[in-house]
Amino acid sequence: MQFSDDILMRLIVFILGICGFLVAKHIYKHKKPDQTPLICPVGFDCNSVVNSGYSKFMGIPVEIVGMIYYALISIAYFVSIFFGDNMPGAVIGFLMVASLGAFLFSLYLITVQIFILKKGCSWCIVSSLVSACIFILTIFAYDFSSITKIFVK
């Protein structure tokens, strides 16, 4: 399993990671009690969503988990732009698992907004869309021909 030669795709994932980080940082900044409440540009109730009981994962605020994930993705893909062909398999595997995990977690959080909280947060939806794009592009960023050679002889 190795990176494909598509540098543009890796650059797009790097930029998406930065965008996701900035969205998560924006949520974090406005979630603090001494800041103005988080305002959604499309009229949702972001402040209620980001301060709900579902806003923490294992005691850690979800936006901090998001910032860590997006920072790791950005750094890894920035490095892959220059050293993609020499990236260790463990790093590639981590990127695949992390992007899948983030995508599934985003789906869970959107489901919570829709069916449990019955409120929305446009910032959270943007973060979920960024996560979904990163996952889709991560799948396309790999050359799976080395794996298929094992199974097809």
Image (cartoon, grey):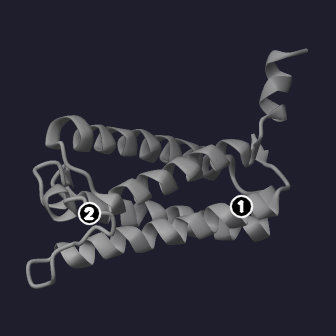
Q: Position of residue 106 (x, y in %)?
A: 38, 46
Q: What mark, if any, has residue 10 been given in the picture?
A: 1
Quadrant location of residue 75? bottom right
Which element type, helix, strand or loop, lies under badge 2?
Answer: loop
In terms of depth relative to the viewer, which is nearer, 44 or 115? 44
| In-image side of 67 versus 142 (left or right) | left
Is disc 1 in contact with disc 2, using a CB cutoff of under 8 Å?
no
Quarter of the rendering occupied by the C terminus: top right
| In-image side of 45 versus 90 (left or right) | left
Q: Is residue 139 visible?
A: yes
> Which residue occupies 78% across, 63% down?
8
Mark 2 surroundings: few (<14), some (14-19) or many (≥20) residues within 10 A? few
> Which residue occupies 42% across, 58% down?
127
Q: Position of residue 99 (x, y in %)?
A: 52, 47
Q: Is residue 58 above or below residue 44?
A: above
Mark 1 surroundings: few (<14), some (14-19) or many (≥20) residues within 10 A? many
Q: Is residue 42 above or below residue 143?
A: below
Q: What mark, if any, has residue 43 been given in the picture?
A: 2
